[in-house]
Image (cartoon, coloured by chain):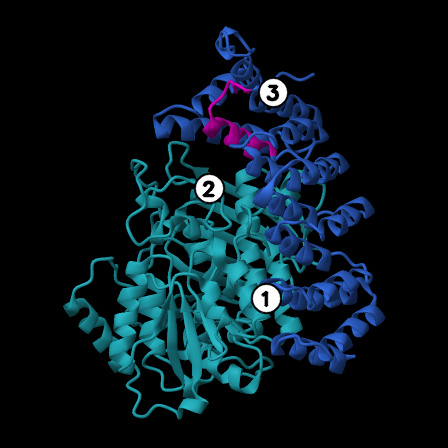
Chain colours: A blue, B cyan
């Protein structure tokens, strides 16, 4: 394996320096390493990804401080507490740097970081940018394991990715109990060139929530355009005609008229 | 021999503050009321009702100033995440219209209004795509400040939505409405300097002939955001940062999470003119080789020095640099033309003055506006197109492609290597990292 710049570990530490200029310099130095290693140097990228990813997910060993003498419950809670080696600011920066490394080696670290409350949104963004199938897998898996509004971000990331498994995961999430997740799913489904998604969107146009109904109408127009762009003109036409007959707002009806008139 | 015509000083935006005195409001309102001196406003039913999103220096001192003096438009709502900005602009609008505009902190409340026909987006760049797309989907026509995008992928989505909804979309590349640039582009496209060989876009300080624009910034301590500023909403889809004054408001231009630095600021103007002259409004270069000087001591992370060479498929070279003044220089086999906001000159007077068989008509001498941004031609072009449903002088596809030129330069400079670009597919050849940099994931919950 190629050797990475020996200053990398020092720069990782310095990203947490209380002097802003030191932390900035360290981040920029690492970014330079990451970006310059990208041209036909896959092995170097893998080595660097492992160094950065290792630091991102590094935890200290559980020790005596994690047990509370005489209190089994607190000891149990304490024993599950993760003590990260690096502070949140450093972990967020590391997760971000891995987003510039489109190699599969970055994925396991980013997937692990989805459990890190401080770094998880940046890890999610970096998984979104990673072209590996395993990045899709990690995001799909996260849909079942992460909570609340963060799941909406995961849906947004899956919307940028392709494949049958991604589409299936998005369809499953359409029934999510969280309203903001359902809204994200409606828009995500519209970006997949799959005509059957219109049934889900049409159902949502009859939802109790005005926000959900409005988003569903917009998503239907978006799905029609996705289908048209993919070559499914008949599928697009069907949806546009349905929009005209629906309770959609005027802008979506206007878009439908424009598309149908254009043929 | 040089031939120079039309030397006029251009107005620069004044700095704005949150603490506003009545004298300041009166001064701005007076300025708004006297520019273009409308003798009579159009009937209310004929006026385009506008929501101004982003009421900082650009939104207030350029858009509100001109629109409030334009009889064909009425700014009925003002939105800014900084309450001080919104209120200040609101007071100016109230003086101009003799009634208070609606004031909002969240742009989505503007888009909900069915009594608003169109929006002007004058926010930091990281917000442009989300706001523009939601506005188009809400049926609004859009005037969006340049650079239209922060990264390449969002531009294609914006174009698609605009075409789907039949949106009249003007990008704030107002040099397309300035006679000097229009004339220069027409001359170049009609081969008045022979076969075009090279275009150089100079992004240094206006009015100078040398010296790079360098603004490294100074480190400021992290602070609690001031009262009235919804900093989380200011950040929106951008990565989270603690608040410090030199990230916000005008200084956003020098932070790559919010803008692209000099190359997307002045570059969005001058590279747009280059693209226009090349007839490349729907395409772009095929090779990019950028050298940039980045200040690793921060706090700003944009390229202080830049020297980017672009190659087009037709053999023309575009050079973008910031050390030799400000303007656009066209070099052809038979001469040259230089154009800026201050002047238009050429290798010989005949290039500018002799009539020729015109194939491409862009410049209309009878309708020659005298200074920029001291005229309202670009807004008027937008308002004309809203009425006719035509395409604007700086249409969305051209705005996307011009912004791409700047982003391509930034990507090459940051990677430190030459790149091959496919303008049709909008992707790089053989460089996965460069392709990753075409897109930028949004902070949750924001999405396109």
Q: Are marks 1 and 2 in contact (CB under 8 Å)?
A: no
Quarter holding the C terminus of chain B is bottom right
Count of labels in the image: 3
**Which residue is at 71% across, 35% downward?**
A138
Q: Which residue is mark 2?
A: B240
As measured in the structure, the alpha-carbon distance from the residue carrying label 2 to the one carrying label 3 is 23 Å
- SS at circle 3: helix
Q: Determine the secondary structure under disc 2.
A: loop
Judge the density around disc 3: few (<14), some (14-19), many (≥20) Cα neighbours within 10 Å: some
Q: Is residue B133 left or right of residue B210?
A: right
> What crowding class fits label 1: few (fewer than 14 Cα within 10 Å), some (14-19), or many (20 or more)?
few
Disc 1 and disc 2: Cα gap in Å?
Answer: 30 Å
Which residues are drawn in magenta? A81-98
Residue named by callout 3: A54
Give the CA distance from mark 1 to mark 3.
45 Å
Marks 2 and 3 on same chain:
no
Tell me the mark number nearer the camera, choosing from 1 and 3.
Answer: 1
Name the chain under label 2: B
- Whether A58 is among the magenta residues is no
Residue A214 can be seen in this image: yes
Q: Which residue is the site of mark 1?
A: A210
Percent across and percent down for residue A191 are: 71, 57
Q: Quadrant of the N terminus of chain B?
A: bottom left
């Amino acid at each position: 394996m190629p050797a990475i710049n020996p200053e990398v570990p020092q720069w990782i530490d310095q990203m947490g320096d209380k002097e802003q200029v030191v932390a900035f310099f360290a981040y920029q130095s690492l970014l330079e390493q990451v970006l310059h290693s990208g041209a036909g140097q896959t092995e170097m990228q893998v080595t660097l990804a492992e160094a950065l990813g290792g630091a991102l997910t590094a935890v200290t060993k559980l020790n005596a401080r994690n047990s509370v003498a005489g209190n089994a419950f607190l000891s149990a809670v304490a024993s599950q507490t993760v003590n990260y080696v690096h502070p949140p600011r450093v972990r967020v920066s590391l997760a971000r740097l891995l987003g510039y490394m489109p190699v599969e080696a970055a994925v396991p670290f980013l997937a692990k970081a989805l459990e890190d409350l401080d770094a998880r949104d940046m890890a999610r963004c970096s998984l979104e940018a990673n072209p590996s199938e395993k990045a899709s897998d990690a995001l799909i898996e996260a849909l079942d394991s992460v909570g609340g509004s963060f799941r909406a971000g995961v849906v947004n990331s899956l919307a940028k990715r392709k494949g049958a498994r991604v589409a299936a995961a998005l369809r499953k999430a359409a029934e999510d109990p969280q309203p903001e997740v359902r809204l994200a799913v409606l828009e995500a489904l519209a970006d997949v060139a799959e005509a059957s998604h219109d049934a889900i969107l049409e159902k949502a146009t009859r939802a109790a929530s005005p926000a959900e109904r409005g988003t569903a109408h917009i998503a239907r127009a978006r799905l029609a355009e996705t289908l048209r762009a993919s070559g499914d003109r008949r599928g697009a036409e069907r949806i546009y005609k349905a929009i005209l007959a629906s309770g959609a707002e005027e802008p979506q009806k206007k878009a439908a008229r424009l598309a149908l008139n254009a043929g | 021999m040089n031939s120079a015509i039309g030397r006029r000083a251009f107005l620069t935006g004044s700095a704005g503050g949150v603490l506003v005195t009545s004298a300041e409001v009166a001064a701005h309102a007076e300025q708004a009321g006297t520019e273009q001196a409308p003798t009579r406003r159009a009937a209310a039913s004929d006026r385009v009702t506008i929501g101004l999103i982003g009421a900082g220096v650009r939104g207030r001192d350029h858009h509100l100033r001109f629109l409030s003096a334009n009889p064909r438009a009425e700014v009925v709502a003002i939105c800014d995440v900084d309450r001080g900005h919104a209120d200040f602009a609101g007071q100016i609008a109230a003086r101009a219209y003799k009634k208070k505009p609606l004031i909002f902190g969240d742009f989505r409340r503007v888009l909900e209004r069915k009594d608003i026909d169109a929006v002007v987006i004058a926010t930091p760049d990281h917000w442009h795509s989300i706001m523009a797309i939601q506005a188009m989907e809400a049926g609004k026509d859009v005037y969006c400040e340049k650079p239209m995008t922060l990264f390449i992928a969002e531009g294609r989505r914006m174009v698609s939505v605009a075409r789907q909804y039949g949106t009249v979309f003007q990008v704030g590349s107002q040099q397309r409405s300035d006679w000097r640039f229009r004339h220069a582009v027409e001359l170049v496209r009609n081969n008045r300097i022979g076969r075009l060989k090279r275009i150089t876009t100079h992004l240094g300080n206006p009015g100078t002939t040398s010296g790079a624009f360098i603004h490294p910034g100074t480190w400021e301590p992290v602070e609690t955001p001031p009262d009235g500023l919804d900093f989380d909403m200011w950040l929106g889809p951008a990565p989270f940062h603690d608040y410090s004054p030199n990230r916000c408001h005008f200084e956003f231009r020098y932070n790559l999470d919010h803008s692209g630095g000099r190359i997307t600021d002045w570059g969005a103007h001058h590279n747009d003119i280059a693209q226009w002259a090349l007839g490349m409004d729907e395409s772009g270069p095929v090779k990019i080789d950028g050298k940039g000087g980045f200040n690793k001591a921060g706090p700003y992370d944009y390229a202080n020095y830049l020297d980017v060479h672009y190659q087009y498929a037709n053999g023309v070279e575009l050079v973008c640099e910031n050390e030799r003044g400000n303007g656009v220089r066209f070099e052809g086999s038979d001469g040259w033309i230089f154009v800026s906001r201050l002047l238009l000159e050429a290798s010989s007077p005949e290039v500018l003055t002799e009539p020729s068989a015109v194939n491409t008509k862009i410049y209309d001498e009878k309708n020659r506006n005298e200074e920029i941004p001291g005229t309202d031609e670009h807004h008027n072009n937008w308002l004309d197109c809203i009425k006719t449903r035509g395409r604007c002088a700086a249409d969305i596809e051209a705005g996307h492609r011009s912004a791409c030129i700047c982003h391509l330069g930034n990507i090459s400079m940051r990677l430190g290597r030459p790149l091959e670009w496919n303008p049709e597919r909008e992707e790089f050849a053989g460089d996965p990292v460069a392709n990753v940099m075409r897109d930028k994931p949004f902070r949750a919950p924001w999405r396109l």
